[in-house]
Amino acid sequence: MKNPIYVTKPFLPKKKTLNMYINEIYLSRRLTNHGTLVRELEQKLKEYFQAKNVILVANGTLALQIAYKSMNIKGKAITTPFSFVATTSSLVWEGIKPIFADIDPKKLTIDPEKIRKAIDPTVTGIVPVHVYGNACDIERIKEISDEYGLNVVYDAAHAFGVKYRGKNILNYGDASIISFHATKLFHTIEGGAIVTQNDDIAHRARLMRDFGIADIDKVEDIGINAKMNEFEAAMGLSILGQVGKIIAKRKAVWREYHDLLDGYVEFPELTEGVEWNYSYVPILLKDESQLLKLVKVLEEKAIYPRRYFYPSLDTLPYITERHNSPISRNISERVLCLPTYSEISTEEVDNIARTIKMEVRS
Ligand code: T4K
């Protein structure tokens, strides 16, 4: 059988670079609990994001949970039904009821007017997602959150390196979270961060990631164990310098797919003012039956795209109240993410695109 082509392949740095950091760990025996490498990565990311506070954590899901807690989001929060399951499950896990506001059919981000309609006195927060790294309608979300006094946590899990109106996208909202999972364009194997301009939120989040411990023998707040370890930070430090190249490659891959498939399938629209990272290649098929047929044909060739994001989160089994999110449901049924990563070749992309063309034509 041919080498399988998955939706992504984690980027691995040169062993020599990684070993330099691993050697430091062997010398210091500092494995975790805010070691030198975690602190170095935190500092470097602060510069990269041009952010006031970056709090590294063990994964993006914990980043969301800590962000909600650090700003006292409780009761209900308005969120998008079109995302990875962690956006919703993190709310439910924290005892917050998700209220779904449907998405824009072209940009696939949450529709601000639907947010406005969903507000009631028990809503305390908004959790929009810059899905695939595409920016939400940040200005209108700010207007609404200011008007109703709601906290905004942007789930920017996919948005490494994205800029909006010239500024790193993580600097909007009360806080943003990002994921550094192995499948992301920048990764620390497992990992994530909370990014905020607000020092009080940052202070609470820092405590919360470490059991609420402020100092030896001093527990100041409720907390959890959400610390990143030194090996994870070593991976991040080894990859950070490569991010420019990684994004350039993904851009070239996206362009190749786009040039070959434009007119055959639909591509989501980018929000005005976004400098994108091309982290995913989502395409929209005509309907679910066309998508399922295409997936079968691709899988026969050992090509494994992914249904990011299916199902629409308002249909999850633990969501008991039914919501009206017809756009998200329709998009979830017919969206497919195509393989993209640093080592994918032009020939492989060409072969995938040709297979798709043949299938959607027939
Ligand atoms: N918010 C949003 C909007 C998110 O998308 C995510 C995560 C989160 C929050 C939560 O962040 P984290 O807690 O995860 O940091 C993947 C990732 O696990 C997940 O991080 C990501 N979003 C989501 C969109 O995708 P799966 O279940 O699709 O991954 P998996 O294991 O099927 O991997 C996909 C393909 O990648 C595999 O078919 C093969 C390849 N692969 C994967 C891994 C892990 C490798 O070649 N090597 C590997 O080590 O969730």
Image (cartoon, grey):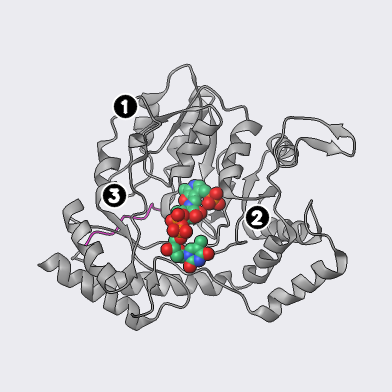
The x and y percentages for residue 56 are 68, 51
User: Answer yes or no: do the residues labelled 3 and 2 have beta carbons within 8 Å?
Assistant: no
- Counting the numbered discs, the total is 3
Q: Which mark is residue 322?
A: 1
Neighbours of disc 1 within 10 Å: few (<14), some (14-19), many (20+): few
Instruction: Determine the residue located farthest toward the top in the rendered image.
Output: 121
Q: Earlier in the sequence, mark 1 or mark 3?
A: 3
Determine the image quadrant of residue 100: top left
Q: Residues in magenta? A: 265-276
Is residue 103 in the magenta section? no
Q: Amino acid at mark 2?
A: Gln
The answer to whether 220 is drawn above or below residue 303 in the figure is above
Helix, strand, or loop for circle 2? loop
Q: Position of residue 247 (x, y in %)?
A: 50, 69
Identify the amino acid type marked 1: Arg
Q: Mark 2 or 1 closer to N-term?
A: 2
Locate residue 106, reporting x and y percent: 29, 49
Instruction: State left or right for residue 123 relative to residue 18.
Output: left
- Horizontally, residue 217 falls left or right of residue 263, namely right
